[in-house]
Amino acid sequence: MDRGNYVDLVPEEECFTAAAKRRVGRQRINDNLLGDSFFCPMIRRTAALETFAAENLAGRLEALVAGCPPDVLERAVSYLSTKETKSSFAIEKEEPTADRTARFVALLGRAVSENWCDKPKLVALQNAIVDPRFTEADYRASQNWVGDSVKLGQEQVQYVCPRPKDVSALMAGLIAADSRLRAAGIHPVLHAAAVGYGFVFIHPFEDGNGRIHRFLIHNVLATRGFTPGEIIVPVSAAMLRDPRAYDASLKAFSRPLLALVDYVFDADGRMTARGNAAHWYRFPDLTNQAEALFRFVQQTIERDLPEELAFLRGYDRTKRLMQEIVDLPSRKLDLFIQFCRQNGGRLSAAKRAGHFAMLDDDEIGRLEEAARLGFAPAAADLER
C-alpha cells in the first residue's frame, strides 16, 4: 500500500503543531496534535504569535546578560527570585512569611535544572508552598471553583473546575503533553503557556494552583533553554503590574465555559458539578493565553531585567564614588543610599542625626551628590 499523501489532523498553516508526528498508517493520518485524548490543547497561528515567535526574545535575553559581571548577575538572580516569589503570592492576595518566601525562592532555583511536570514532584511542590494544614497527598477529591461567596446561597462563580473524577486523567494527559512538546521542540513560550495555563484550568489541588501554574511557566522556559543560566524572568511581576491583562487571559477560557457547565450548591455551600463536561477541559484553545504570556515575557525582558541590572550597576558605582569621599563601613553606605533614594536624593535631618552625626556638612553634601551621580544614565555611559 502506498504510504505517501498523509493528512495532518491539524493543518500546519492554521495551528502550531507537534513536529514529532505519529503516523496512523491505515487511515493515512499524521497525528501532529500537541497532546492526546486525555488532554490536547490547541494554539492557533495568529499574526500576533507569529510576530512574537520571530522576535528572538531568547536571543535578546541572552544579549542582555552577556558581559554582566558574575557578582552583579548573581545578585540580580537573587533579587528577581525574591521579586517573583512575592509577586506570585501577591496575585493570590497573600503575603508570605520569611520562611515560605525562602522555600519558594529555593524551589525556583531548582526550577532551572529539573522538569517538575510530574505527579510526585507536583504533589511535593504543593506541600512545600501552602500552609502545612492544607497539604495534599494526591490530587483533590472534592469539587472546587473560583469566585466569591458573598454569603451562603449567594456565590458569585467565575470558574467551575473539572470534576474530581476527571482530574487524574486530565493531569496524566497534561504530563504526557509536556513530554510531547519537549520532544517536538515547539517554541518554549508556547510550551509554557500550554502547560502552565493547562495546569491552572485543571486546578488539581485545593490550594496552591495559581502559584504552581506560574512556577511551571518558569520551569518550562528554563529547562527548554529559553532563559540563560539561572536567570529568572519575573512573569508574575508583569502579571501583578497588569492584573487586568492577566485576569483577561484566565477569563478567555473560564467565562465561555461557565455557560456550558451545570453545577449546584448544597445547604453547606459545597458545589457539585453535574453532567459530563470533561471534554471541555480536555481540548482547550489556549491561543489567547499564549499571546498573553508572550506579552508578559516581552515586558520582563524590555523592562524588569534591564531596570534591575541597571540599578545594581548604579548601586555599585554609587558606593565606589562615596568611598572616595569617606571610607564608611559597607552597611553605612547602604543605609545612606537607601535613605537618599527614599527622600528625593537628600538625607533627612532625622536620619542624619540618628545614623550619620559623625559626618560634617561638606561630607554630607558630597555624599548626596555621589548618590545622585552614581545612578545617573550619564555615569553608565562613562564606564562604557
Image (cartoon, rainbow, N blue to C red):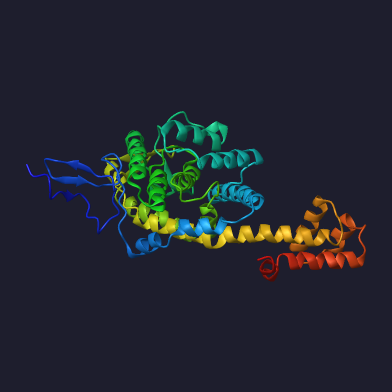
**Is 260 rendered above or below residue 165?**
below
Q: Quadrant of the C terminus?
A: bottom right
In this view, the residue farthest toward the top is: 137
In this view, the residue farthest toward the bottom is: 378
**Is 123 rendered above or below residue 16?**
above
Q: Quadrant of residue 247?
A: bottom left
Q: Position of residue 18 (x, y in %)?
A: 29, 48
**Is 62 rendered above or below residue 40?**
below
In this view, the residue farthest toward the left is: 1
User: How many numbered discs sit on the rendered protein?
Assistant: 0
Q: Residue at x 70, y 61 (%)?
A: 314
Residue 344, visible in the rendered structure: no
Q: Residue at x 19, y 42 (%)?
A: 23
Toward the viewer: 353 or 218?
Answer: 218
Q: Quadrant of residue 333?
A: bottom right
Q: Quadrant of residue 52?
A: bottom left
Toward the viewer: 88 or 181?
Answer: 181
Name the side, left or right, on which 294 lies relative to 90.
left
Q: Position of residue 331 (x, y in %)?
A: 80, 50
Name the side, left or right, on which 202 lies relative to 361.
left
**Is 376 rendered above or below residue 66?**
below
Q: Position of residue 280 (x, y in %)?
A: 29, 46
Q: Residue at x 25, y 59 (%)?
A: 13
Q: Position of residue 251 (x, y in %)?
A: 40, 55
Q: Quadrant of the N terminus?
A: top left
Name the side, left or right, on which 26 lies relative to 309.
left
Residue 292, visible in the rendered structure: yes
